Amino acid sequence: MRKASLLIAGAFALASTLPATAADKMTLLLDWFVNPDHGPVIVAQEKGYFKDEGLDVEIIAPADPSDPPKLVAAGKAELAISYQPQLHLQIHEGLPLVRVGTLVATPLNCLLVLKDGPIKEISDLKGKKIGFSVSGVEEAVLGSILGNHGVEMSDIELVNVNWSLSPSLMSKQVDAVIGAYRNFELNQMEIEGVEGKCFFVEEEGLPTYDELIYVANPDTMDKDMIARFLKATEKATQFIVNHPDESWEIFSGTSTELQDELNAKAWVDTMPRFALRPMAFDAARYAAFETFLHEKKLIPSVNSVSKIAIDISAQTPAE
């Protein structure tokens, strides 16, 4: 027995002198500066969930929000956070991209008006000005919503307000804005003492979609590494749901810029929209949105779902 004990002790001593297995390095490009939409990523980092999965994740906020998918397509990063509507267009533009996971599983976009303003119904927008930030998908979304209420795009004036959505509405530069996020712009307006009203795109005839997704290059991606990344973010999402106050303290504690009323309100409104199963996806949802874009003449053909999104768990060997 003593000999066996010595052998075991010797084995432990030898193990303690060996270098720890190096973590797999990967880069995640955010879609924008860090904000509550990125809660599961930041919490997974702070709680050590990535480390538990053998990952060393570098999280980078882009200088230009349009760059992350392009950089992933070019092999400059393993993952980027992007938007389902944009992904459909980018694939048709020839970018090698595929959705591998979901971060925010519901639309955040809305058609925003002043609550006490003259626009009570969408039909009231006829002859009015509507602000937008990104052409293409937002115009298709707007056209679909307006068309369901007897308003044509020729009946309104589009105004490019860049990213100044709620300020342009509050200053009455425009009568409505499309592309406003219900978890941010509504709260921003409330803090400014101006109440807003959202017409939710998925309630106005638009196919529902995943607002924020993880995209990878299907030709070069490491499926096992991505699966471990998504496993860590799933664990973080569960922690957020189970411990909303503690998770907010962890998230906001990473930067003083996050510790304000707007981010605190946005955190509460964003939590219910995080994907509880980041790997899983609804194929019919992606097929419906592809068809919608084709009907709106934004894409020349209809891709199969397998070219747009995959279930990464089905692409990796079972343990």
Image: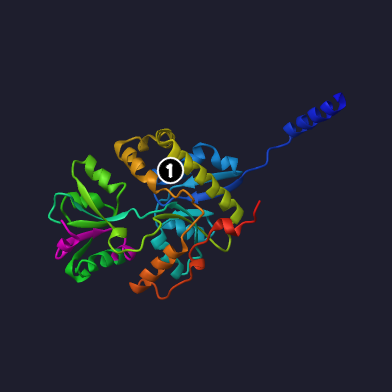
* Residue found farthest to the top: 2
Secondary structure beneath label 1: helix
Residue 19 in picture, x, y percent from top left: 70, 37
The residue at 21%/70% (across/down) is 152
Instruction: Give the crowd class for mark 1: few <14, some 14-19, many >=20 residues within 10 Å.
Output: many
The part of the image, by quadrant, that contains residue 206 is bottom left
The residue at 47%/69% (across/down) is 94
Pick whichever, 65 or 5, lies toward us: 5
Q: Is residue 124 above or below residue 297?
A: above
Question: Looking at the image, can residue 35 be seen?
Answer: no
- Residue 288 as seen in the image, left or right of residue 25: left
Q: Does residue 124 belong to the magenta stretch? A: yes
- Residue 141 as seen in the image, left or right of residue 223: left
Q: Is residue 171 above or below residue 127?
A: above
The residue at 79%/32% (across/down) is 11
Q: Does residue 63 belong to the magenta stretch? A: no
Q: Which residues are magenta?
A: 120-139
Pick whichever, 255 or 317, lies toward us: 317
Question: Looking at the image, can residue 25 be seen?
Answer: yes
The residue at 47%/63% (across/down) is 283
Q: Which residue is mark 1?
A: 39
The amino acid sitting under disc 1 is: Gly
Q: Is residue 79 above or below residue 143?
A: above
* Residue found farthest to the bottom: 300
Residue 57 in picture, x, y percent from top left: 54, 45
In the rendered image, the quadrant that contains the N terminus is top right
| Applied colour scheme | rainbow
Residue 3 in picture, x, y percent from top left: 87, 26
Pick whichever, 54 or 71, lies toward us: 54
